[in-house]
Amino acid sequence: MTRADWEKSYVSAESALREAGVNDADLLKLEEVRVRFMGRKGELTELLKSLKDLSIEDKRELGPKAQALKASFDAAIEARRAALEDQGDTAALAADAIDLTLPSVRAPRGRLHPLTTTLHEIARIFQLMGYSWAEGPHVEDERHNFTALNIPENHPARDSQDTFYLQDLPLLLRTHTSPVQVRTMESMRPPLRVVCPGRVFRHEQLDATHSAVFGQVEGLVVDENIGLADLKGHLQTFLQKLLGSATKTRFRPSYFPFTEPSTEVDVKCFFCPGTGCPSCKHTGWIEILGAGVVNPAVLKAVGYDETKWSGFAFGIGVERVAMLLHGVRDLRHFYTNDQRFLKQFDESLL
Ligand code: PHE
């Protein structure tokens, strides 16, 4: 190659480079341009290679010129690539920009079930009155659920209509929390004051006021000289703490085999001014618990000296109390777990 030829190629490469549009190219186009000029058979590559055909003097003079052209080409390509990458980063950042001023989504907070808070509230009041907490098994034997409680063999409460018996076993699902009363007396010496909260089971048709599974809190006090007056005092105090100091109570004579005398306690209806409504079955009063002075036969059955010790016991239904506290007229709401119902019970309510 002659010097003149080389110079022609140089001029043509230089103008081709100028027109290659490096500064408008996208990344793909940029690579094409790079290959076109600097690839194995690229125009600039050829130009640099052909330097070898020139004389030493020409090489010395033209070599640096060619190198400078290549350097400015490399620099242009690099500058464009950096600009494009920069733009890409900016676009990507803009695409997933986070607005730090947006309020966050509140994580839903769990809360205690209204039956749980009601149970806690009942137990809390009794604990303030010096009662401790005792629990017992759901599956019981006849002795603890019936016999020791003075419920004789032929008593209708033992009927399979009411009691769930376990198949082929002399065991049953406890029908009340009173067996815990028996277990407590078997394991402790008097004096004692306990509440025994828990779930109980009866063969009941589910309706607005009945369920086959429900919560009860049993209470038991055994000491010297305990009688009906103590029972009335404790229960009245409890009901006024639970339902308000203006709460009116009524003690009606009743019957339970394990207490003598026995009573059922009513509170003045919350839903009407005592004039009668469906909630109080038009009587103006709502039954809230069963109670009585512990039958000496029960004390004897657990080995206590019934001439020295006496006591009283009571049983209160958790659902009934929750319905009264919250004005719920159908207890099935407590079991269906409808969020619209449950969300109304803020923990601050109790
Ligand atoms: N165990 C009784 C019931 O479930 C309630 C009760 C308990 C009554 C203690 C008197 C004394 O119906």
Image (spheres, rainbow, N blue to C red):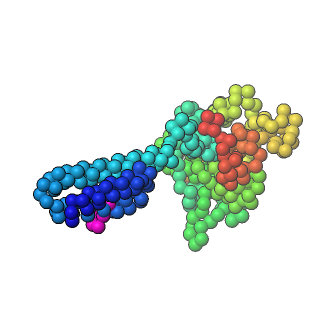
Residue 34 as seen in the image, left or right of residue 307: left
Residue visible at 71% across and 39% down in the picture: 326
Q: Nearer the viewer, residue 343 or 263?
A: 343
Residue 159 as seen in the image, left or right of residue 15: right
Residue visible at 64% across and 63% down in the picture: 164
State which region is magenta: 37-42
**Could you say which quadrant of the image residue 262 lies in?**
top right
Q: Nearer the viewer, residue 288 or 327?
A: 327
Q: Is residue 324 above or below residue 168?
A: above
User: Residue 317: where, in percent of width, then height?
Assistant: 67, 46
Q: Nearer the viewer, residue 334 or 100?
A: 100
User: Residue 212: where, in percent of width, then height?
Assistant: 68, 58
Residue that extends furthest to the left in the rendered view of this protein: 56
Residue visible at 24% across and 59% down in the picture: 4
Residue that extends furthest to the bottom in the rendered view of this protein: 168
**Could you say which quadrant of the image residue 264 lies in?**
top right
Task: Say if residue 246 shows up in the picture.
Answer: yes
Q: Is residue 317 above or below residue 228?
A: below
Q: Is residue 283 above or below residue 205?
A: above
Residue that extends furthest to the top in the rendered view of this protein: 245
User: Residue 154: where, in percent of width, then height?
Assistant: 69, 62
Q: Quadrant of the C terminus?
A: top right
Considering the whole magenta stretch, tell me its main secondary structure: loop
Total number of numbered discs in the rendering:
0
Task: Say if residue 224 shows up in the picture.
Answer: no
User: Residue 190: where, in percent of width, then height?
Assistant: 50, 40
Q: Quadrant of the N terminus?
A: bottom left
Q: Nearer the viewer, residue 350 or 306?
A: 350
Q: Is residue 254 magenta?
A: no
Residue visible at 27% across and 51% down in the picture: 69
